[in-house]
Amino acid sequence: MDKRKIILDCDPGHDDAVAIMLAGKNEKLDVQGITVVAGNQTLDNTTRNALNVVQCLGLDIPVYAGCGQPMVREKRNAGDIHGKSGLDGPVFEALTRTLEKKHAVEFIIRTLMDSDGDITMVTTGPMTNLAMAMRMEPRIIEKIHEIVLMGGAFANGNTTPSAEFNIFADAEAAYVCFNSGRPITMVGLDVTRKALCYPSIVERMSRVGNVASKLFADLMAHFCKAQKEVYGWEGGPLHDPVTIAYLIDPTVIQTKFVNAQIEIRSEQSYGRTNCDMFQYMQLKPTAHVAYEIDVQKFWNIIEEGIRSYS
């Protein structure tokens, strides 16, 4: 069976860490590299977090540091959810894994240019690295098989009433990517907010009893507590791994092919993903937007991913 080649561009982040865990040993995926961007925390923190996760899980996947600030707007992070480190909760052993010397944007460009057009870009943080790569070397655009992102919402945001964090953190970068003409699957808050990690889920995964299940439980202890304090959720919504679950089993979500545009000019609605779910505007569809998720199937995929580390 041919594995699907992906580059995982992320900003760990508790849910990014679970996405790395889910992708790292899946027999259907070939992770070419992990590229890191500032988002949930500063680039220094998100990069260290990515290295800690791959080291903890024993993954032989190269990690590349990318952009430390957005293309246009000022930086912001999500310390209220992910803590001062960006990955508060787990206690990792002394870090021995090291970053690759190449910049993440350079790695994305080189890997795509050398490919046969069979690499999927998965972004679970701000889309700065991918947008910068497109701007630096436009020839890579036609080499991208698909862009699968966790970001946006056709209903309510989580940073402003209009905007989801990953898009809001660098809407100009999202604008570049959404207007690239490449196939896009948008996994937004509309489905990820249904994947709530209740205490019963944490207990279920803990029973697996391996390094991945311990890391999952340690991650969720902080993440779920923070989500309850900020949003009142009884379980933290596990946003980012839904992208990986979709690549493993596309039937885990349902999508609708619609026109989707990124708002970058409005003061009040900056960062909104305007998804024409009812085709009011009669414009050409540009993105497959997720609107439903099979929650039971999703958690089964998560458990299978954790068991792969036994």
Image (tube, helix red, strand yellow):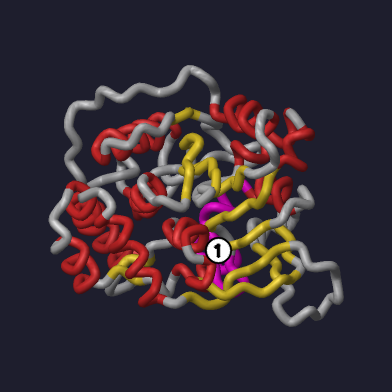
Q: Inspect the magenta stretch and tell me whether residue 144 lies in it.
A: no
Query: In the rendered structure, which segment of residues is drawn in magenta?
Result: 153-170
> Is 3 displayed left or right of 94 in the figure?
right
x, y percent for residue 80: 35, 53
The residue at which mark 1 appears reads as: 187
114 or 72: nearer the viewer: 114
| 181 vs 59: above or below | below
From the viewer's perspective, tell me whether residue 220 is left or right of residue 270: left
Residue in front for this viewpoint, 190 or 138: 138
Residue lying furthest front in this view?
A: 1
Residue under the image location 37 percent in, 54 percent down: 15
Question: Percent position (x, y) of residue 307?
Answer: 25, 56
Rate crowding at label 1 as few (under 14), some (14 to 19) or many (20 or more) other CA atoms within 10 Å: many
Q: Secondary structure at mark 1?
A: strand
Left-right relation of 27 to 266: left
Q: Is residue 28 above or below residue 156?
A: above
Q: Tell me where residue 223 appears, x and y as whole percent.
A: 29, 57
Seen in the picture, residue 38 relative to 290 is either above or below; the reply is above
